[in-house]
Amino acid sequence: MAKSTEWGSRIGFILASAGSAIGLGAIWKFPFWAGANGGGNFIIPYIIFTFTIGVALLMAEASVGRAGRGSAVQAMKKMGGPFFAIAGFIGVISSFIILSYYSVVGGWCVSYLIGSLTNSVLSSDAETLKEGFAVLVSDPVKNVFWHFCFLTLTCGVVALGVEKGIERIAKFLMPLLFILMVVILIRSLTFPGAMKGVEFLFAIHPETMSASTILNALGFTFFSLSLGCGTIVTYGCYVKETTDIPSSSGWIAFLALLGSILSGLMILPAVFAFGLDPNAGPGLVFVTLPIVFDHFPGGAFFAVLFYICLLTAALTSSISMLEVVIAYLGNEWNVRRPRGCFACWIALFLFGCVSALSFGPWSDVKVFGKTLFDALDFLSSNILLPMGGLFIALLTGWIAWPKFKEQLNYVKNRGTAYTTFIHAMVAIIAPIVVLLVIYQAYYMCNNLFLLA
Ligand code: TRP
């Protein structure tokens, strides 16, 4: 990788990585996922995981990137030999797979943003909204068209380059995202009855705490910090020598967590205030929220703001996934950025159609009892990402610890207590918990297989 490709500033790196972290995971999945998993029971382990294993693995990925100075494959190979090149390659493949279906959901966001601008997505009738959403996802032409639009935006930004495209858009969109979230949150919290939503989100019910809630929280921590598929390794390779990786990683983890919590606080109180069902699952932001927006004066305006948030968050994340693939193509195969983006645009469009069509014409095609969309999500989030996390942990904890430690102390000298804590996290704790997550995925697969 040419040394000249670098973030212009530390804040650029932090915002781009936070942009990668805060995505559909935070705004679309977190509110209903936290709800489905028992509110506080889920959030407490999520916070603990974020500031222990999560932050340690963020530092590990960013350090591998900067020390290896290359794409995920090259950086991991330089640090740990050919075996780890394969691990890096799995990261490239997972990024590609995740992006292919992420772009389909991103397409729904584009569609709802345009719908909110033309005032055609709001209604007080739940059935109309449900049907509108069902038509969007099951109509092959519509679904594929919006997927195409979202993908075009993603490829366009990445084609502009790291500093001129990714960093510039993150510096503009991330502050905008936070401002909009706070504006909507204030509106949402000031509805009468809103506090029930806050309670639902944070209340802890120790009696219903279960192992699967904790493992779900762990899986979500990985997904929400963009760990395990080379994203932060790739972004880390553009980090300047003068940037302090530990403190930057702390900021990224903090902003990612803040993004999820703000999103829960902007959505759930409003849903409760209007007596709607918080357990609407994936339809929460596309079916339930339009009812909320329809219920109060100025709601149409808030709907536009909300769908801008959603699209912004999705876009800064999809960009980071594409960059993993583009860095790999440039590094290993000397493919120039615009050409790589063009090739990925076509390949991802075609592959993404598999997920897009799995809501309509291909809804009967099942793998392990799941639709193709769900199966790809399961494969990547529950199997490939934890595996990627495991490889990074083994690499930095066992094989290349001295180099990782050097990166931790690069700008500022940390005490032994600090480095020992991080070492324990990546060498022992992270591998153990990741194996547990993989075991849970395997167990669920087996169960499904038995049921089938
Ligand atoms: N973190 C993003 C979200 O919450 C998604 C994402 C971007 C991601 N890059 C990733 C997830 C890499 C896993 C791995 O929506």
Image (cartoon, helix red, strand yellow):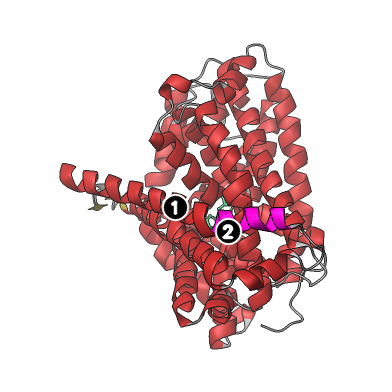
Is-magenta flag for residue 179?
Answer: no
Quarter of the image containing the C terminus? Answer: top left
Instruction: Give the amino acid type for the residue marked by disc 2 in the picture.
Output: Ser
| Residue type for callout 1 | Ile
Q: Is residue 389 above or below residue 67?
A: above
Mark 1, residue position: 432
Q: Nearer the viewer, residue 23 or 312?
A: 23
Ligand 1 positioned in quadrant: bottom right
Tell me if residue 304 can be seen: no
Residue farthest to the top, as pictured: 192
**Label 2: which secondary element:** helix
Please state, as top left, top right, bottom left or bottom right, where the N terminus lies in the image: bottom right
Around disc 2, counting alpha carbons within 10 Å, would you say few (fewer than 14), some (14 to 19), or many (20 or more)? many
- Residue 263, given in percent of the width and then of the height, sits at 63, 35
Q: Tell me if mark 1 has few (under 14), some (14-19) or many (20+) residues whose alpha carbon lies within 10 angstroms of its own.
A: few
Q: Is residue 449 visible?
A: yes
Image check: 239 left or right of 272? right
Q: Indicate the quadrant where residue 118 lies.
A: top right
Q: Which mark is residue 97?
A: none
Q: Residue furthest bottom?
A: 334
Rendered residue at 60%/59% (across/down) = 423
Q: Position of residue 407 (x, y in %)?
A: 71, 68
Disc number placed over residue 318 in the picture, else none: 2
Q: Which residues are magenta?
A: 416-426
